[in-house]
Amino acid sequence: MKRLYTPEWVAPHPVDVPDQLRQEIGGSDLFLQMLVRRGYVDPQKARVFLDPSYYQPCPASQLPGLDSALPRIVQAIQNHEQIGIWGDFDVDGQTSTAVLLSGFRQLGCDTVYHVPVRGPESHGISIPYLENFLRTGVSLLITCDTGISANNAIEYAQSHGVDVIVTDHHTLPQTLPNALALIDPQFLDEDHPLRTLSGVGVAYKLIEAVYAEMGKTGDEVTLLDLVALGLIADVAILTGDARYLAQRGLLQIRNCPRTSLAAILSENQVQPETVNETVISYVIAPRLNAVGRLGDANPIVEFLLTEDPILVAATCNQIEGLNSDRKIKSDEVFKSAQAMIESEPRLLDKPLLFLGHPEWPTGVVGIVASRLVNLYHRPVILFNTGDPQIAKGSARSVDGIDITSAIASHKDLLVSYGGHPMAAGLAVSTENFDSLKYELIQTIDQIATISDYHPTIEIDAQVNLSEINFQLIDELQRFAPFGPGNPPILFSATNLEIESISSMGRSKEHETILLSDSYGNTFKVVWWQASEMPHPSSRFDMAFSAAISTYKGKTQLQIEWQDYRDCEVEMTSKRSKGQTGINHLDLRASTNPVSELRRIISENETLIFAEGSFSCPLQTVNRENANPSRNLVMWTVPPSLGILQSFINKVKPQNIHWFALSADEENLGILLKRLGSALKSGPGELIYEDAATRFATTSALIHQAFLWFAARGDITLQSDERTHGIYTLVSHPANIQQTELLQNQIQILHNEVYAFRDYYRKTPSPASLLAEEAKRPRKSRA
């Protein structure tokens, strides 16, 4: 279907840089050309975009509804009334609640708050919980990041003598609630500078107005770090005031991070001065979101505001635990959804993926939906169908298809819904589930046809990889923060080839790829979530971004793979690594493998692969220390096809002698026992990949084993986001439930390794192992 095809690459159009822009702004030609392409031709507008000190923010009074809200809030403050704040459990909701709570506390207000717990309450305002909340004596209720669709709840509150002020940013419903004031930037024109504020931005502007009224103008700036956190975590369009607030908030985090954020950064070995939108999006926000998705986010509000080091440390430990749980659950749901698609490929004939399962946690289906959108480039809705009466789901979309509007067009079938053009939450009765699926697929099909939706990738500059250096990337960082409305700068390079691939990450989900260009230069590239994606089989062009990354105090230039396409330059490709032109000698059934090995070694210089504890009379290599060699012996059996393929890509052999000897660690009990001994005798830090190599398994299994030892009470584990496990030997009470969960996960991963090794030993031809990779279908990634 025409709207679901491979993204089209749009080359940068030539532009003329005005002399005045060149003189007043300065910079390289590439930098100035990008400014012009992004619409900043006038030097004054360019200066305002690049430097927040030149930006004139809009007064809070321009927000609709503020003029009605302000007198009532001032009255409540002066009369010492109890103000109630009702928030939401995602990061935007957490920070919105914290901004209002901190703002009113600094004015000496009697203030209470409530953040819904996702499991029993879901998003929005549930009347039974609202009833309990109002019993505390609230006379003025202020919502944040929620409420614009809560007609019944607001009517309930006002009927009980409680005035309600709604601050929200979500899409306006057809029927608005009858509140005292509705403050939502969606009432503004689309080009208004305040239009793209998220919930925390609206909350901040409200506090700004209140402080001005109370003679404390300027005191609200201490909250800007929370505003930046919420804006970026909620993927707000970073234009106008939203960009200005994010810029100033990021500067505040870098220069003087509050105690809670400093603790999260320290836990993950990130220096505060390096914090940018990427750190927020991939380090801070997922951890805070994990609490809202899987637990109770109310303590996070106090965590964000406290300076108590004991409370911060305890909460940080809980956050890390829930984040690990979130990753496990997300991976399980993703694999389950992939299994559904693989068993029923016709699902991909539809313009919408609409899937449900009774065991999918509602807290992670949105995360998985986003991964599936990236993989299959169409809207995705995933449901938890465990409730026999109501299915709860999360939707994610692609540019050009407003998923919330599509869902709203079938509100007669729904119990509830709400969201943005790119994301939504919804609930549907089980009797209407199939009807909703049919109707939404038809609606998405019509929207895509009318809009002639066609995914594109806009390239900012075509370069040679050798042109990417610290000076260039440092200059282009002036465009940051990046996000919707200001996408990351995207380069393209042509005529590349993969030299080797190394997996990384706890679940081997990412890859470090060594590329070569047509001049023979080599470059290291990071490809996130690469394990889900097909790889080029010959020379190709790559779309990529680049950043300066600081990790464990070491600063480096990081090139990040974004997309690829077949090379437009017609060239003769090198032979396909490890797949064609290899002479395979099958010795798996040999009755005297040592004798065979000595014969092979005596005839030719040969590399021998072996991992784990094994019997071999000669020196061997493993997946990490291979070098090119004409002759290769596969002595023991690797734990996965990916590791086998990566190793052979490094060696580039012409002859492979296939044996199939066992390492002791193929037995899971032996593996865990020896890993435990290594932990007890080690220095307190073990690289997952090194341990996986040492014990002849996958790093995904090693990571789960680390978590298992921690849950048993043997160690305290602090893990970074890449490859290390840093731990302390202790003895503390076991978490029985978590131990059992991890035992099951370890067994699943071990079964995967066993299944591959069994196939390795039984397949009629070992060459067929390498053919498996070549048969993988190519799916596009935008």
Image: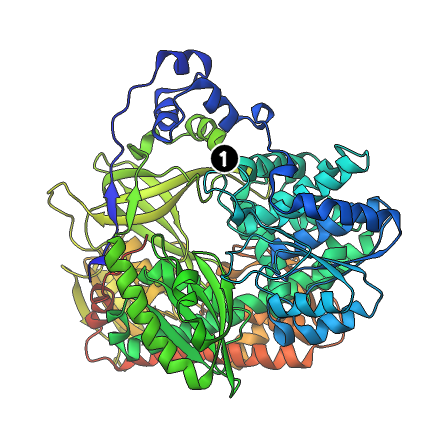
Label 1 sits on a secondary structure element that is loop
Q: Residue furthest bottom?
A: 388
Residue 457 quadrant: top left
Task: Tell me the residue at 35%/48% (across/down).
Answer: 562
Task: Tell me the residue at 61%/82% (across/down).
Answer: 740
Vertical position of residue 282 compared to residue 740: above or below? above
Asked if residue 190 shows in the view, the reply is yes
Q: Is residue 611 left or right of residue 271?
A: left
Looking at the picture, the colour scheme in use is rainbow
- Residue 235: x, y in percent? 50, 50
Residue linked to disc 1: 480
Number of disc labels: 1
Q: Nearer the viewer, residue 445 or 244?
A: 445
Q: Nearer the viewer, residue 635 or 688?
A: 688
- Residue 160: x, y in percent? 77, 69
Would you call the spot at circle 1 few (<14 residues within 10 Å), some (14-19), or many (20 or more)? some
- Residue 686: x, y in percent? 58, 59
Q: Nearer the viewer, residue 679 or 585?
A: 679
Q: Is residue 357 left or right of residue 13?
A: right
Task: Tell me the residue at 77%/73% (across/down).
Answer: 132
- Residue 444: x, y in percent? 31, 65
Q: Nearer the viewer, residue 674 or 423?
A: 423
Q: Quadrant of the N terminus?
A: bottom left
Residue 524 quadrant: top left
Residue 66 quadrant: top right
Asked if residue 453 shows in the view, the reply is no
The amino acid type, in three-letter code, at marker 1 is Ala
